[in-house]
């Protein structure tokens, strides 16, 4: 089973569409069925458990892949599924944190998302390390990556990482996708990145992510490139030439901020995604969360 650890602001939306297109109704975007009391203050960090997957197997009897923000390898999924194959993408922590701040501004308004105050919030600090290890412990995160043999791609080398992912871990994936051009203008993220003072503030309190990203960039990712072999550059050029034939889909920022509208825009022009698989995956997802909501409203134990 493939397990996609969707770290925020690392290109995961495109990966979700690739997984839907490739696996169809055999792919599930998972979330914990209940949030434990220990995660009430940090619901974004609540991981799915093997108990959650046991429930999902009733709705997905031929489950081949799972993904989402709540798929986290520090949990016990590998005990029930010893052949589970984790993968994720990581991003320069400064750029990622700026993008997370941008999301906060878009969701709350700049007057309600004050930069200096937002930096002090736990959800803004060391997000990548926490999603691997469950805590901002770099050594634990590195150990989990190595012991679970997690594939880690790099957002800044997105196409190359997709090619490595397909070849080394998931040959069933169809990694064709259409590029999206989002017109943002003068964004909050751009402003804090271009100012040397605020850029340095993005580094502060984010040291664990900086250390983990450096390890992945210097030790883990080069290993994948060596394993692929000498044909990587040639094959990457061919793959990127193929992607260029699909053109670019313009996506207004207003659509990106409203997930339902964003999905509608893509459904109107699915190529190069597999339309049948995408539709089946989204229908399955709708009925999964509708069932969960009904059970929760009735106070039934899942």
Image (spheres, grey):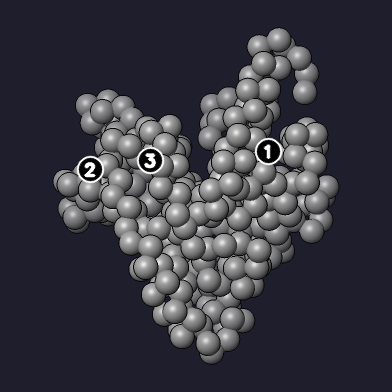
Vertical relation: 53 (above or below) 160:
above
Asked whether, in this view, residue 239 is left or right of residue 75, the answer is: left
The answer to the question of whether label 1 and label 3 lie on touching residues, with beta carbons closer than 8 A, is no
Q: Residues within 10 Å of mark 1 (few under 14, many from 20)?
A: many
Callout 3: few (<14), some (14-19), or many (20+) C-alpha neighbours within 10 Å? some
On screen, residue 22 versus residue 209, left or right, reads: right
Of the numbered discs in the image, which one, if any, rests on residue 294? none
Residue bearing mark 3: 265
Q: Residues within 10 Å of mark 2 (few under 14, many from 20)?
A: some
Residue 35: quadrant of the picture: top right
Asked whether residue 190 is in view, the answer is yes
Q: How many marks overall?
A: 3
Quadrant of image for the C terminus? top right
Which quarter of the rendered picture does the N terminus lie within? bottom right
Q: Earlier in the sequence, mark 3 or mark 2?
A: 2
- Label located before the other in sequence (2 or 1): 1
| 144 relative to 34, above or below | below
Q: Secondary structure at mark 3?
A: helix
> Is residue 140 something one can see in this rendering?
no
Q: Circle 1 is placed at which residue position?
A: 48
Is 295 left or right of 249, judged from the image as shown?
right
In the picture of the structure, the residue carrying the numbered disc 2 is 188
- The Cα–Cα distance between marks 2 and 1, rounded to whole angstroms, is 32 Å
Residue visible at 45% across and 54% down?
271
Q: Are marks 2 and 1 in contact (CB under 8 Å)?
A: no
């Amino acid at each position: 089973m493939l397990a996609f650890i969707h770290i925020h602001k690392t290109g995961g939306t495109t990966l979700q569409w690739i997984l839907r297109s490739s696996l169809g109704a055999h792919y599930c975007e998972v979330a914990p069925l209940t949030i434990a009391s220990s995660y009430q203050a940090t619901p974004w960090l609540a991981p799915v458990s093997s108990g959650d997957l046991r429930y999902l197997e009733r709705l997905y009897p031929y489950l081949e892949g799972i993904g989402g923000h709540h798929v986290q390898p520090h949990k016990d999924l590998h005990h029930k599924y010893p052949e589970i194959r984790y993968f994720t993408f990581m991003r320069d922590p400064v750029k990622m944190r700026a993008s997370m701040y941008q999301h906060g501004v878009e969701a709350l308004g700049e007057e309600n998302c004050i930069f200096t105050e937002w930096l002090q919030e736990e959800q803004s600090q060391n997000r990548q390390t926490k999603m691997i290890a469950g805590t901002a412990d770099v050594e634990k995160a590195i150990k989990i990556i190595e012991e679970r043999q997690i594939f880690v791609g790099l957002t800044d080398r997105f196409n190359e990482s997709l090619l490595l992912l397909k070849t080394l871990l998931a040959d069933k994936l169809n990694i064709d996708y259409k590029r999206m051009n989002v017109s943002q203008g003068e964004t909050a993220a751009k402003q804090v990145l271009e100012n040397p003072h605020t850029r340095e503030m993005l580094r502060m309190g984010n040291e664990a992510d900086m250390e983990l990203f450096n390890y992945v960039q210097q030790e883990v990712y080069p290993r994948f490139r060596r394993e692929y072999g000498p044909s990587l550059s040639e094959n990457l050029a061919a793959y990127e030439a193929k992607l260029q034939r699909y053109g670019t889909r313009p996506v207004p920022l207003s659509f990106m901020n409203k997930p339902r509208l964003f999905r509608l825009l893509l459904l109107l022009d699915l190529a190069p995604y597999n339309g049948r698989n995408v539709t089946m995956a989204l229908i399955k997802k709708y009925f999964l969360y509708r069932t969960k909501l009904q059970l929760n409203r009735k106070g039934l134990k899942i």
